Image (cartoon, rainbow, N blue to C red):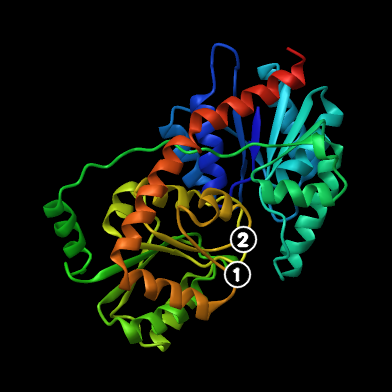
Amino acid sequence: MHLIHSMAYGGIETAVINWLRKIDRTRFDVSLVCFANPRETEAPFVEAATRAGLEVSKIPWGRRKPLIKSARRLVQHMRAHNVDILHLHNVYADCVGAVAARLFKVRTVATVYVLADYGDWKRDLIQTIESKVIHLFDRVTAHCEDTRNKMIELGFSLNKVDTLICGFETHPVIMSKEERSRRRRELGIADDEILLGNVARLYPEKAQDALLRCFKNILAEHPNVRLLIAGVGPLDASLKTLCSEMGLDDKVKFVGFLSDLPIFMCLLDIQVHPSHIEGVPLALCEGLAAGLPIVASAVGGVPEILNHGQAGVLVPAEDEAAFSRTVIDLIKHPEVRTRISASAKRFIENDYSLEAAVARVERTYCEMMGV
């Protein structure tokens, strides 16, 4: 049974759904539980899981964090499914799972996605709690090598933390030049314009504010550049206000949540991702699959999926000048964009497949069961 606390549908949610879609159902009977949040913010995740053929049960949650109530409800679900292994995702799931495991005999495994200093007292406190709780589980895994290394710094033995990559399943989009041009025109993008795209939740660590500042610098040198920002989150209003204050409304468009991400990626010329904190962003995997040249901050698991600069261009975190210069250089050199594009596709298709990721998950469960 997988338990996840989802506030929105993003990379972690996608990874869990993909694992459960592809896991060998002849060997593993899997079930999925999420938290019922006060404003139903879990709805996009539940809808996506349902579309993938997964049934989602819910346990109660709210501002007062009802650990005992939620744990007891989780125990009811585990008894009904005769669960052997409880797999936990995100800190609240870890906390509820730790309590439930005291009430119902079950093996526990947690996957840790990001360990970083957010600079926000609440989120840093939550992460501190997570770093303590994960010591209670039978097995702990990391989403990328960067997170694994940080867990070892927390005291986990080198051979006790496995890396469970999210993996990626490519869905090639066949689109003619005429169709691509038509779709771009529908977005207001002319054929001779260079289109940059950012896909991420609108949260502080995703640094869309820095991206807007970089874009203004890029625009000063290349007036035929446009920027699309795809994502939702609490910074939506403030980012749009900043965009207006910078006089960029005619060059930047916020397109919200996208359900057709592979098609959107085909319309871009360059993907830009200046995050301060990351695990492994599946938005970049989508960009790699589309063969996009990517400029991204060298944080978290990003260097791992950009093949340490071979499948994209890495820039030091929070260096807006370097980020701007790198994008400008890519705009000036289409032959470099072509080379990166070929390397990106090779990496995502050969080295980061969903099949390889699911095989690691299955192996972890077999080891936990001693089979």
Question: Does 48 sit above or below residue 247?
Answer: above
Where is mark 2, residue-wise? 299
Quadrant (top left, top right, bottom left, bottom right) of the N terminus: top right
Local packing at callout 1 (Cα closer than 10 Å; few below 14, some 14-19, many 20+) is some
Question: Does 167 sit above or below residue 326?
Answer: above
Whether residue 230 appears in this view of the structure is: no
Considering the numbered disc 2 on the image, is that residue within a helix, a strand or a loop?
A: loop
Q: Is residue 199 left or right of residue 184?
A: right
x and y percentages locating residue 55 in the rendered image: 51, 28
Q: Is residue 80 left or right of residue 216?
A: right
x and y percentages locating residue 142 in the rendered image: 69, 42
Q: In terms of sequence position, does the residue under pointer 1 or pointer 2 come before the other?
A: 2
**Residue plotted at (52% across, 50% down):** 307
Q: Say which amino acid is labelled 2.
A: Val
Q: Is residue 364 left or right of residue 324?
A: right
Whether residue 299 appears in this view of the structure is: yes
Quadrant (top left, top right, bottom left, bottom right) of the C terminus: top right
**Residue plotted at (76% across, 63% down):** 124
Dividing the picture into quadrants, the one containing residue 191 is bottom left
Dot 1 and dot 2 residues touching (CB under 8 Å) = yes
**Residue plotted at (83% across, 52% down):** 153
Q: Say which amino acid is labelled 1.
A: Ala
Tag on residue 317? 1
**Residue plotted at (41% across, 33% down):** 51
Q: Nearer the viewer, residue 52 or 369?
A: 369
Dividing the picture into quadrants, the one containing residue 72 is top right
Tag on residue 264? none
x and y percentages locating residue 16 in the rendered image: 56, 36
